[in-house]
Image (spheres, coloured by chain):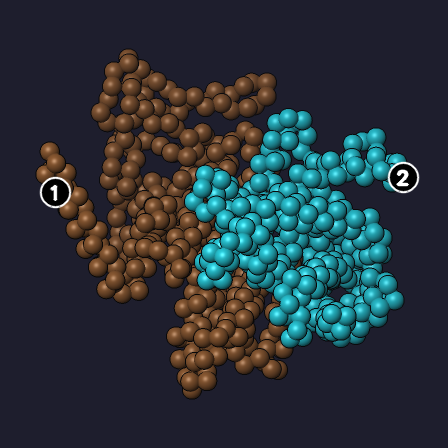
């Protein structure tokens, strides 16, 4: 088991390396660079920028250096815990991340917890009582949750919020907590503001998980060993929880990677729509500005979070399924 | 009396024996069809989606107006309800709508529309309207429905420029409904091949594929889509952007997901006793896949496929909603939903939210069909 985890940890390093290369290249894909878009913005705002000034900006920001040089400069910094510098915001990336990452993580963790807490019991219930009233109810509910995209839910949420308060931005906490240092009360207040957005971010994943779990468990319940166990008089509840439920978790945990990524995607679009001060809105901005170190760092952080999630799910898979534990 | 009952019982037994016989000799595809037909919601969804695709194909005919035609006097006009009872309380066999009149509040400049009950406009089918080219080459001017007098009738209201929302939704279906299909087919079959090879052969191919898909699945797709969408050249035509968006969405969503799940299923299935037995019996790889592996995860694959199509539709909608991907003048449901980003506009003109209803219903229909297919493909379920 220990060896398994070490191996998985080692395998993570090349994955993260490939992600960092891929994101850096993708961000540099559009023609032009940050100085181009900066100069364009300034000219649009009637600020005169001479060619000399532009050249000195280019030299200072190093945007004309070859791509590998820029990449290794950024990567070298990351290895020392420095995520680089945001040219557009004129601020170290570390500062920006430090002020926004906690909210991203809070929403992510909250939605994951909500997802598991809702999906697993309902999935098992729906499969074991197939075609019962509860099954139909949760199927309809799940289908609705899967059919309504999270950004549409977010728009509806914002609309309702506007109707109720006349405000068009959803705050993270009550005003009196904004300037206060962190305390339990402040944390509780933030969670009380964020649980509903977190639920929206988790809605699609929850519905998909219920469906998958139900389908897998139904496949498993039809197998002969279940019939044999029941025929031998093993209590139904014990039969279900001892084997089929665990078996049906197998493909479910494999796809947990996708679920986590979907949660992060859901969080991104939700935060942009609701204007929450997480990493997402600033990420969209940095892409448009070609602020590559900021955008690259954010993709890297979001991906690293997901990879860690996948690792956890792999370990979980080995715990649940002894056959996999033996083969690795 | 008794005789009648026995007769009825006999008849009943006769049919059930006949039905049983029929099942015994039916081919797997026949059984598949029967099982699917029993899932009523799936059948209804299938008919609905077929209608939607027909609507998108004949958009010029179904839509009452050109989707770009601007009626500047009717900016943000609300949907006009259809009436059967006229102002004198008499029932009219031919449905009609009232013409819209507007009043402008002098202080706020706010426009309110109301129905002009003195001006009923009878509706008709196959009425003459804007000229267009049917199927792209037959000049025609007949539309599915409209007012007989040719006056403006907007079933779902007008947008911020005074364009007919229903017409725009119909045309938007062309992009939104096809993109998912194309992307999923391309993506899924590549995923099937890659995942199949990796699952069966294992070894270095499996290792590399898994590392790559791990990279692709562990990058939350939306940020990468956003990054790639920003990279799309602004001067591309609608068609070029459409194809590029389809490929981007399929590549990062479907291929890696499908190959991962197919691989997992193959790996666990090949350990099953009956597959081992077939291998020991000397069956070739092709036969093992077709005969023993494929039928076994068919249900799983179907569930996956139908989950993927709405996923693609959602992705396109979300991307366009954020103002990336497809841009106006392209019309897709996501592009139409861009208008909903301004909450105050949405509050004054809630009908701008109607495209979302279309998105949701289409996604639900795909999900129901997927569910029906899954049940039909399940070898353990009874007919």
Residue B202 to residue B138: above or below: below
Which SS class for mark 2? loop
Q: Position of residue A280 (x, y in %)?
A: 70, 50
Q: Work out whether residue B128 or residue A134 is closer to the camera in this orientation and state it.
A: A134
Residue B100 to residue B228: above or below: above
Q: Work out whether residue B72 or residue B380 is closer to the camera in this orientation and state it.
A: B380
Question: Which residue is depicted at the point 45% across and 30% down?
Answer: B77
Rendering quarter of residue B347: top right
Q: Position of residue A257 (x, y in %)?
A: 63, 60
Distance (Cα) linking label 1 and label 2: 86 Å
Identify the chain of the residue marked 2, using the numbered disc in the image.
A
Residue A13 appears left or right of B158? right
Kindly indicate whether the residue at mark 2 contacts the one at mark 1 (C-beta within 8 angstroms): no
As drawn, the chain in brown is B
Q: Position of residue B207 (x, y in %)?
A: 63, 77
Q: Work out whether residue A5 or residue B224 is closer to the camera in this orientation and state it.
A: A5
Rendering quarter of residue A10: bottom right
Which labelled disc corresponds to residue A168? Answer: none
Colour applied to chain A = cyan
Q: Position of residue A54 (x, y in %)?
A: 79, 62
Q: Residues within 10 Å of mark 2 (few under 14, many from 20)?
A: few
Which labelled disc corresponds to residue A181? Answer: 2
Question: Which residue is depicted at the point 34% across and 27% down?
Answer: B82
Which SS class for mark 1? helix
Which labelled disc corresponds to residue B7? Answer: 1
In this view, the residue farthest toward the bottom is B282
Question: Which residue is depicted at the point 70% across and 50% down?
Answer: A108
């Amino acid at each position: 088991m220990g060896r398994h985890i070490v191996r998985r940890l080692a395998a993570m390093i090349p994955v993260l390396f490939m992600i960092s290369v891929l994101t850096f290249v993708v961000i540099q894909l559009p023609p032009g660079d940050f100085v181009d878009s900066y100069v364009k913005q300034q000219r649009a705002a009637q600020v005169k920028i001479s060619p000399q000034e532009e050249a000195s900006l280019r030299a200072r920001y190093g945007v004309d250096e070859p791509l590998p040089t820029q990449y290794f400069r950024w990567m070298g910094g990351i290895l020392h815990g420095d995520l680089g510098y945001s040219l557009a915001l004129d601020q170290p990336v570390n500062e920006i991340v430090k002020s926004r990452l906690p909210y991203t993580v809070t929403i992510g963790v909250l939605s994951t917890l909500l997802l598991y807490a809702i999906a697993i019991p309902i999935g098992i219930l729906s499969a074991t009582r197939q075609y019962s009233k509860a099954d139909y109810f949760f199927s309809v509910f799940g289908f609705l949750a899967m059919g309504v995209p999270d950004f549409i839910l977010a728009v509806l949420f914002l609309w309702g919020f506007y109707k109720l308060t006349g405000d068009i931005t959803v705050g993270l906490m009550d005003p009196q907590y904004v300037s206060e240092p962190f305390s339990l009360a402040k944390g509780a207040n933030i969670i009380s503001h964020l649980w509903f957005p977190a639920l929206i971010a988790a809605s699609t994943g929850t519905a998909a998980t219920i469906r998958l779990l139900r389908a897998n468990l139904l496949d498993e319940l039809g197998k002969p060993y279940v019939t044999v166990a029941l025929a031998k008089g093993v209590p139904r509840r014990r039969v279900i929880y001892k084997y089929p439920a665990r078996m049906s978790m197998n493909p479910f945990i494999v796809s947990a990677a996708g679920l986590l990524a979907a949660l992060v995607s859901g969080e991104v679009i939700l935060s942009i729509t609701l204007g929450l001060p997480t990493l997402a809105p600033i990420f969209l901005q940095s892409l448009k500005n070609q602020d590559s170190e900021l955008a690259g760092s954010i993709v890297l952080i979001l991906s690293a979070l997901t990879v860690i999630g996948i690792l956890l799910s792999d370990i979980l898979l080995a715990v649940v399924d002894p056959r996999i534990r033996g083969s690795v | 009396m008794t005789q009648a009952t026995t007769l009825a019982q006999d008849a009943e037994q006769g049919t059930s024996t006949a039905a049983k016989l029929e099942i015994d000799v039916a081919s797997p595809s026949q059984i598949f069809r029967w099982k699917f037909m029993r899932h009523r919601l799936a059948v209804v969804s299938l008919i609905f989606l077929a209608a939607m695709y027909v609507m998108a194909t004949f958009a010029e005919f179904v839509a009452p107006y050109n989707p770009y035609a601007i009626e500047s006097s009717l900016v943000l006009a609300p949907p006009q309800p259809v009436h059967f009872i006229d102002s004198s309380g008499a029932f009219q066999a031919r449905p009609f709508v009232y013409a819209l009149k507007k009043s402008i509040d002098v202080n706020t400049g706010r426009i309110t529309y109301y129905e002009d009950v003195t001006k009923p406009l009878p509706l008709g089918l196959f009425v003459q309207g804007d000229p267009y080219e049917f199927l792209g080459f037959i000049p025609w001017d007949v539309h599915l429905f409209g007012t007989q007098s040719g006056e403006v009738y907007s079933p779902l209201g007008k947008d911020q420029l005074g364009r007919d929302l229903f017409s725009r939704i119909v045309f938007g279906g062309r992009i939104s409904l096809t993109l998912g299909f194309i992307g999923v087919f391309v993506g899924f079959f590549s995923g099937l091949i890659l995942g199949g090879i990796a699952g069966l052969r294992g070894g270095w191919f499996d290792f590399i594929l898994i590392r790559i898909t791990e990279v692709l699945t562990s990058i939350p797709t939306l940020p990468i889509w956003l990054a790639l969408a920003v990279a799309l050249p602004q001067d591309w035509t609608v068609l070029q952007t459409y194809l590029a968006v389809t490929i981007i969405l399929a590549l990062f969503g479907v291929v890696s997901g499908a190959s991962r799940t197919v691989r997992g299923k193959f790996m666990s299935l090949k350990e099953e006793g009956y597959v081992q037995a077939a291998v020991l019996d000397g069956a070739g790889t092709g036969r093992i896949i077709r005969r023993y592996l494929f039928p076994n995860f068919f249900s799983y694959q179907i569930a996956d496929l139908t989950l993927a199509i709405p996923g693609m539709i959602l992705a396109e909608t979300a991307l366009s909603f954020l103002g990336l991907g497809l841009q106006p003048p392209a019309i897709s449901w996501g592009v139409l939903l861009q208008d909903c980003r301004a909450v105050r506009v949405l509050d004054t003109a809630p009908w701008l939210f109607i495209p979302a209803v279309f998105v949701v219903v289409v996604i639900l229909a795909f999900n129901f069909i997927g569910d029906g297919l899954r049940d039909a493909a399940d070898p353990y379920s009874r007919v």
